[in-house]
Amino acid sequence: MKIINCKTIITCPGRNFVTVKIETDEGVYGIGDATLNGRELAVVAYLEEHLFPCLIGRDPAQIEDIWQYLYRGAYWRRGPVTMTAIAGIDTALWDIKGKVAGLPLYELLGGRSRDGVMVYGHANGVEIEETVDEVAKYIDLGYKAIRAQCGVPGLPSTYGVAKDKMYYEPADAELPSENVWSTEKYMKHVPQLFERLRDKFGFDHHLLHDVHHRLTPIQAGRLGKDLEPYRLFWMEDAVPAENQESFRLIRQHTTTPLAVGEIFNTIFDCQQLITEQLIDYIRTTVVHAGGITHLRRIANLADLYHVRTGSHGATDLSPVCMGAALHFDTWVPNFGIQEYMRHTPETDEVFPHDYHFKDGYLHAGSKPGHGVDIDETLAARYPYKPAYLPVNRLEDGTMYNW
Ligand code: EZ4
Ligand code: CO
């Protein structure tokens, strides 16, 4: 079997998605997600100009060799654009392998390790009581785990607070919108949110929180400590993680479990975090960490150090990524949890899929490959629209982390 054609499909059914499609001389094709929020066309150019020409004529069964060719062979390694492009191709090749074998992807990885994949949904509100109502909705829908975010008094807007609650999309403007941040105001407010939630709902559901890279290590230690009475499933992205050693200080001060990694693209971004047991959950996912082939390596390393997976699953990760991630989650021995933000009905229509939600779990389905397809005619009806993630400034105007 030979690869005869590769292309990207760009579509915007509410938000932008980049999909790789690889076609073979035997008629079998595979697809992979290659969406990098706010930087979509950089990945498209990398794929079309630099990677696709190298794939024509190759045997799609040689997934490992192709991965090594694209990673090592490029000389220039790592980085979000490169690794997202490689991920799109890698996912499409696994999809082809599954279709050729007539097996769902989780069977190729080693088979099912669990019946369903526990997911967490996003509850958010401008005020605490609004978030409380949203958490109640997720509990009614059957969720076992819910991430809770809320607005901070004195700050006009912040990460995690959405106009459209179920379909939160932070890339909201043609040029980056600007948020204002105060660590002091935030740190005073968050423990009140979780006190109220535990008071109202008790301890039967997992609660999670995303700090979105906004603290210093000692502040994160303090917040983790303040949240200990509410027994969070995790505190996510407490500090920017370029400096992996930062987590040592957080660890010294709190037993609140730590999650990080949605913006990591290789095992080298989390090597120290894992081997020194500085985190509890690694959030790398298929689309931004080099595909199934590389994510498997990260998960295997993590398993040796009691670190479990908790893959990123926001709406900017397309249903193709979600499908592949769910097969991965169904297999991976050290699974922790999977983030699940529902896509809009328009997006679900463009990407028909085999996965489904039931009683707090997602089920990968049993179709060969990852079980997600793309309706190209429908996709063409939603042309690309430039959209950026916001930027963040402190109250005195200093640029900060978003
Ligand atoms: O801000 O996916 O945990 N989820 C998140 C997401 C990210 C977006 C960025 O594109 O932090 O909402
Ligand atoms: Co996050």
Image (cartoon, helix red, strand yellow):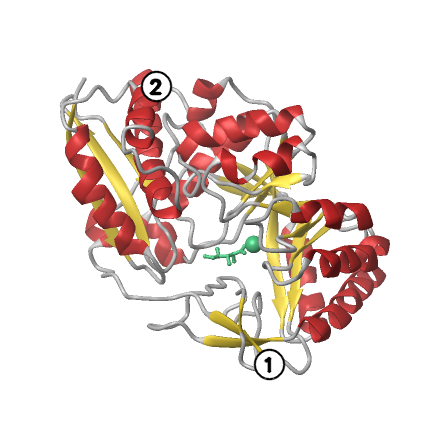
Q: Earlier in the sequence, mark 2 or mark 1?
A: 2
Q: Judge by depth and name the residue closer to the eye, 365 or 216.
A: 216
Residue drawn 35% across the image and 21% down it: 64
Q: Amino acid at mark 2?
A: Gly
- Report the number of numbered marks: 2
Query: Can the viewer see residue 336 in this picture?
Result: no
Disc 1 Cβ-to-ligand 1 distance below 8 Å: no
Q: Residues within 10 Å of mark 1 (few under 14, many from 20)?
A: some
Residue drawn 42% across the image and 43% down it: 288
Return the residue at label 2.
Answer: 102
Q: Is residue 246 above or below residue 88?
A: below
Q: Is residue 221 left or right of residue 44?
A: right
Q: Position of residue 216 (x, y in %)?
A: 67, 60
Q: Position of residue 70 (x, y in %)?
A: 29, 31
Q: Is residue 153 above or below residue 365?
A: below
Image mark for residue 395: 1
User: Quick check: marks 2 and 1 in contact, CB under 8 Å?
Assistant: no
Q: Position of residue 106 (x, y in %)?
A: 47, 24
